[in-house]
Amino acid sequence: MRAAVGAVTTTTVSVLPVFLTGALAVQISAELGFDPAGLGLVVALYFGISALASLPCGWLVERFGSGPTSRTAVTGAALVMGAVAAFAGSYAALVTILLFSAWCNVLGQLSSNLTLARYVPPARLGLSFGMKQSAIPLATLLSGLAVPAVALTVGWRWAYVMGAGLALAALLVAPRDTAGRVRTRAAHGERATAALSVIGIAAGLAAAAANALGIFLVASAVERGISPGLAGLTLTMGSAVGLTLRLANGWLADRRSGGHVAVVAGSLLLGAGGLALLAVPGAPALVIGTVLGFGLGWAWPGLLQFAVVRLNPSAPAAATSIVQAGVYAGGFIGPIGFGFIATHASFPAAWLTGAITMVVASAMMVVGRHMLVAHRADREMTAALRISAAS
């Protein structure tokens, strides 16, 4: 239980700076002066650096262990949020400070993956990854609550101060192990690198579309005439739905023998319908689209990481870093594209583009699954031939 709690807490506070910025964008932009394209650029650069750092951080986590790397990630996130509150006096300063938190997100994610893979029994591993990935909607939930509770009362900077305090408190439950392990050549050979790369690209496309939910939903709702407070609460509701279904996905995964990547593909296909609904005027479409978008289109990361860890038990952080690199690359491309379309066309056009992107991601996930099945069959055949030759 401590491993799961530590993984969830570490992941939540590591990613909190960027989602807090998205939720508070209306208040921050009123003071610092930037439009949706500017917000998209901030988030894009953040995830672009995360993509570049993913593979090296995977090696660092395997080498030094989840304890030191998770504590480093949490401490870094606290320092960044404190710096935003104190020193973000311009758009350029906000961008510069937030970019320093990108490596915190990567270390937090991958160290949590290693913690769960090492210390959680296999029978509960799926639920544990669902709990760990519930940290993302939990971060957006906290960010959404920060709009009416803090930003509209005492000011948006105090939301970052509270976030920094939350991050420092997370050190109390961060993993304590110090055991690291250098990857072996055999462990590297066990990974279906080509299949994982295809799945990583699919995950990147899906993330490019789904990240817009946490970053642009409030701004989009405000533009269609909904009050900032109600828009923040809509984001909170969507985050709560996403959190619940990530847990449900993990619980169900422990009761299946396989087919996890196929479930991810199906979720993406249905989640695309939710993004399309966000392009439809009216509060009912907004609510239903938010529920479907968060509940299906953005509830798959834990299940996907669980599947990757199950296939690569000897080096879970290194293997998941391949997929995470794709997710972060999508986080880089998505906000730029979404912000550009929203600024120069409209928010409905941007949501429809996201829906199409998610459909393509679903198709590529199916291709990656077929490659994984073929890789597994080749490994089993090779093992059988070696046993036959030895006997």
Image (cartoon, rainbow, N blue to C red):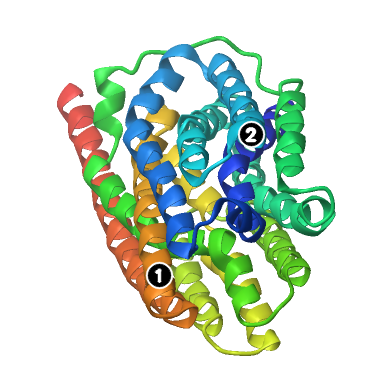
Q: Which residue is mark 1?
A: 358
Residue 279: percent from the left, percent from the top? 51, 84
Residue beneath the point at 69% across and 49% down: 138
What type is the residue that disc 2 sits on?
Met
Residue 81's label in the rendered image is 2
Cβ atoms at labels 1 and 2 below 8 Å apart: no
Residue beneath the point at 34% across and 56% down: 333
Residue 377: percent from the left, percent from the top? 26, 48
Above or below, comparing residue 237 to residue 99 in the picture: below
The reply, left or right, for residue 246 in relation to residue 354 is right
What type is the residue that disc 1 sits on?
Met
Give the structural element (helix, strand or loop) at label 2: helix
Above or below, comparing residue 124 to residue 369 in the picture: above
Residue 241: percent from the left, percent from the top? 70, 64
- Nearer the observer: mark 1 or 2; the answer is 2
Front residue (pair 387, 290): 290
Quadrant the C terminus occupies: top left
Front residue (pair 260, 299): 299
Q: Quadrant of residue 124?
A: top right
